[in-house]
Amino acid sequence: MKKTRIFVDFQNADTAGRIRLSCVGTVEDLNRLGIVLRDGLELVVCSYELEADGVVTYSAAEKRWVAKIDWDKIRHLPGDG
């Protein structure tokens, strides 16, 4: 099954290296796609030129949803050149 893709800001990571799922573009994608975040949900997180597989978890310390990614497995998306 193909994983759902959502926009994220890769520069918006917490101290554990997890991507915060709270930027405007992320929230818009979640609402548009009808996604309800839950622990263990697998998504593809992407920006304009990067993407990675992520697993959603709740950060109790920050009281927000985050996605754990493998920073060594970020993929570069093809650009306009």
Image (cartoon, helix red, strand yellow):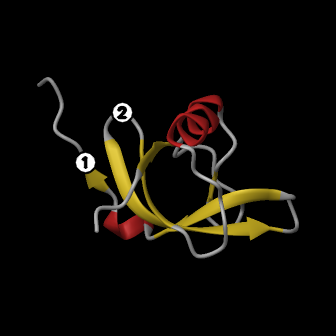
Looking at the picture, tell me which residue is in the foreground, 47 or 1: 1
Can you identify the residue that label 1 sits on?
Answer: 76
* Residue found at the far left of this picture: 81
* Residue found at the far front of this picture: 34
**Splitting the image into 4 quarters, where does residue 57 fall?**
bottom right
Q: Residues within 10 Å of mark 1 (few under 14, many from 20)?
A: few
Number of marks present in the image shown: 2
Query: Left of 71 or right of it: where is 58?
Result: right
Residue at the spot 70% in from the left edge and 42% down from the top edge: 22
Looking at the picture, tell me which residue is in the foreground, 13 or 6: 6
The disc labelled 2 sits on which kind of residue? Tyr
Residue at the spot 64% in from the left edge and 49% down from the top edge: 21
The disc labelled 1 sits on which kind of residue? His
Assign the N terminus to one quadrant of the image: bottom left
**Splitting the image into 4 quarters, where does residue 56 fall?**
bottom right
**Splitting the image into 4 quarters, where does residue 40 fall?**
bottom right
Query: Left of 44 or right of it: where is 40?
Result: right
Q: CA distance from mark 1 to mark 2?
A: 9 Å
Residue 30 drawn above or below residue 61: above
**Residue 48's disc number:** 2
Assign the C terminus to one quadrant of the image: top left
Residue at the spot 58% in from the left edge and 42% down from the top edge: 30
Q: Of the two numbered discs 1 and 2 on the same chain, state the one appearing first in sequence.
A: 2
Residue 58 drawn above or below residue 32: below
